Image (cartoon, rainbow, N blue to C red):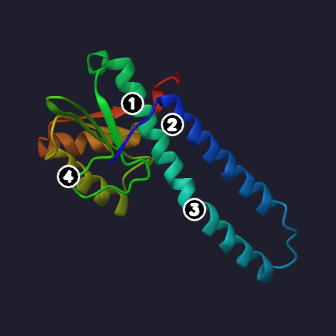
Amino acid sequence: MEMVGTLEHCRQKLWDDVQRLAEATRRFSASALHSIDQAVPILADYRKEIYEDLNQIQHEYALVRAMEWFNAHRPDLGGLVWYWNPRAGGAKDEPDLRGADLHGVRISAEVTTSPHAIGVLHSRMVRTLAKLSFMEGERFYFVVGTRMERQAQNSVEKKGYSISVVNLAGLRAP
């Protein structure tokens, strides 16, 4: 896991990433398309260039919003040092976001940017909640919509997990 810098630094990095993604979109949309045989390879190149960033920027932004939620709703956690896996690439025993102090891990959190949990996304949510349920500290699962909030809350209650589900959709930007 990486230590989180300031939220301002995180937001600036995200903004730079979004600007690069927008530039790639402008470049690809400026291509003159004359046939389906020409267009499909161009679309494949476009997907290759933006796909990972398109997903990961949303994930990283949700993590920043989660830290902002903690700042707004849990001022008692102001002295924590935050660690994260901004690009969702952590080890199996690591959460997306961890808050720790001299006494150990105080917060373990996961985020999802999926709008709802159907099929593979439902299985992923169930696995993530099970993984999170064994982590140290208070546990949080951050979502970005009411449908996913409901589905996650139902899973948490059904399994009896001690996990707080938080919907970031209504959180105002700082």
Distance CA(mark 3)–CA(mark 1): 25 Å
* Mark 4 or 1, closer to the camera: 1
Image point 46% across, 30% down: which residue?
Answer: 6
The quarter of the displayed image where residue 99 is located: top left
Crowding near the residue tagged with mark 1, few <14, some 14–19, many ≥20 C-alpha atoms within 10 Å: many
Image position of 84 with respect to 51: above or below: above
Amino acid type, label 3: Tyr
* Mark 2 or 1, closer to the camera: 2
Residue 70 x %, y %: 35, 25
Query: Which numbered disc covers residue 56?
Result: none
Q: Are marks 2 and 1 in contact (CB under 8 Å)?
A: yes
Is residue 144 in sight in this rendering?
Answer: no
Q: Which residue is mark 4?
A: 131
* Mark 2 or 4, closer to the camera: 2
Image point 42% across, 26% down: which residue?
Answer: 68
Q: In terms of sequence position, does the residue under pointer 3 or pointer 4 come before the other?
A: 3
Q: Which residue is mark 1?
A: 67
Distance CA(mark 3)–CA(mark 4): 26 Å
State how many labels appear: 4
Amino acid type, label 4: Lys
Crowding near the residue tagged with mark 2, few <14, some 14–19, many ≥20 C-alpha atoms within 10 Å: some
Q: Is residue 102 left or right of residue 95?
A: left
Crowding near the residue tagged with mark 3, few <14, some 14–19, many ≥20 C-alpha atoms within 10 Å: few
Amino acid type, label 2: Cys
The quarter of the displayed image where residue 157 is located: top left
Q: Is residue 26 left or right of residue 163?
A: right
